[in-house]
Amino acid sequence: MSQVEVRNVTKRFGRTVALDDVSIAFEDGGFFALLGPSGSGKTTLLRTIAGFHFPDSGSIRIGERNVEKVPVEKRDIGMMFQNYALFPNMSVAENVGFGLRVRKVGSAEETRRAREALELVQLGHLGDRRPSQLSGGQRQRVALARAIVTNPKVLLLDEPLSALDKTLRVDMQIELKRIQREVGITTIFVTHDQEEALTLSDRIGILRDGRIVQAGPPREVYNRPVDAFAAGFLGEANWLSEGALAGLTLPADPSGRRFATRPEALAISAAAPAPGMNAVRGQLVQRVFAGAMATCLVEVDGQPWKLIARDRDIPELPGDGAVWLAWAPQDTLVVPA
Amino acid sequence: MSPIALLGRIWLVLILIFLYAPILVMAAMSFNASPFYQLPFEYSSKWYSDMAGNEQIVTAAIRSVLIACAVTAIATAVGTAASVALFRYEFRGKRLLQALLFPPIAIPWLITGTAMLVFFFTIGIGRGTPAVIIGHVALALPYVIVTVTARLSSFDVTLEEAARSMGAGAWTVLRRVTLPWIAPGIVAGALFAFAVSFDQFVVSYFLSKPGDSTLPVLIYTAIRKGFTPEINAISTIIIAVSMAVMFLAARYSKFGGDR
């Protein structure tokens, strides 16, 4: 358990700059999600912290130690891979005990700690199986047990849930969060799934083109995105065109800024809303019923807007589709243009 | 059974006869008492005991086996190392190097043998058992590399990364993760190497000293002097050994199929 700090790290592959002067700190015991589109450098950052890549410049500190020149096997990390990477020639218990055997802890302690780790992921009874005899979710758990059994300083997860189907994924998210809390290990998690990042982590870092766009607690990043990319990547944003700004109560001076709303901050109605609310006129394109929730697609001044609300909160709408979308002025997102 | 299927069966039997009839005749004759292949067949193990008493044959057989063992050890070690290196590293000229590894399979042995003989004389190794071993290693190496590389192509490199992340150094990763995965390919490659060396005639003929023949060379020399059923006996044994080795190799490599 330690703090991990990345300072001014740059990494190039040939002419491509994969990481461009990245600085970010991961708190002790925190659960940190690195989020970004493919090619944003999130996996490169994770693998550079792991030691599979050495930075061209900059430093990486794990705990008290500068590790930017230390090879993977000496960094004292735990890592979980997208395809689990379980050793097919070893039993589940041998897989989990591998890191302990490498550290020569002695066979009695190896057996004991491997069993404890397997019990932590609720697979204590499957130690004798081969990885090929396990289901996807079970392999996932074995990979997790194997990554934490040596009490590493940091746990690195490379899209570990992306191979699971949706139901199993949600179960595993909860399980992963529980185990991370229980062990208290500093965890860095790479994902391209924003919902997963929001559910699991207590801090999020959004990457784009090898740079950290924004880092902070999920709610802060969601409610106060620093730019249009962050606003659009974490959650959805309805952008206000310049012509639509007249008459609205805006939280900041409009020059050099853009404004947006989140789909769930909006209310839709046929009549003009109460004074004090911001509102724009739009043309309803489609209303999609999805059980508890419903989505309305509305065209506002040429821009596609989206509203998400409980279906029962959406009133009867006129046949010609002319509607008002309203929101509280403090729910307006502001980003630099 | 439909007529087509029946024709298919007959065709298959004909092919098998074509392939194995000469061998079966030879094997049968090695148990026939008559030295002039006369029928009716009369069982005798005389030729086998003659063969066992023939010091030249026994010495040549032992030499062949020892050479094949040495060749197997060297070619398997070098070939496996080469395959792992070709799999793991990207470097300039890698494709060219890979391409250069295969001609020994295609170049006629006669040419290879002549070239080696000239080369070994030029650099002072000359003829003899060391020259034979070097020559056989060169012939066997591509077979090892092909089988091990085929196995490696299904190897998941993240297994190595996972092992390293758990603290395993390069040697431990190789021994505990990579080698266990490619072991069937290595075994198959070793069996091929053994077979290539043990059955090799042309290159051995060029490179061995007259007194130190390998078994195939001795058989060839003996046939030129006159065909005796003793040769049938030793040939039958060689065929049995070679086929056993090839069956094992096929079983381990599955000829490219997966396990």
Image (spheres, coloured by chain):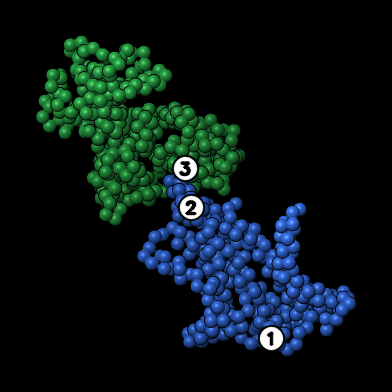
Q: What letter labels the chain drawn in green? A: A
In the drawing, does residue A139 fall left or right of residue A276?
Answer: right
**Label 1 is placed on what type of residue?**
Thr
In the drawing, does residue B9 fall left or right of residue A207?
Answer: right
Q: Is residue B86 above or below residue B108?
A: above
Q: CA gap, disc 2 to disc 3? A: 18 Å
Residue at figure coordinates x 59%, y 40% from the top left: A133
Q: Nearer the viewer, residue B168 or B181?
A: B181
Residue at figure coordinates x 28%, y 46% from the top left: A19
- Disc nearest the viewer among 2 and 1: 1
**Label 2 is placed on what type of residue?**
Val
Q: What letter labels the chain drawn in blue? A: B
Residue A223 appears in view: no
Q: CA gap, disc 2 to disc 1? A: 50 Å
Q: Nearer the viewer, residue B184 or A240?
A: A240
Residue at figure coordinates x 32%, y 51% from the top left: A54
Q: Which residue is mark 3?
A: A83
Q: Which residue is mark 2?
A: B173
Residue at figure coordinates x 42%, y 19% from the top left: A291
Q: Is residue A37 above or below residue B234?
A: above
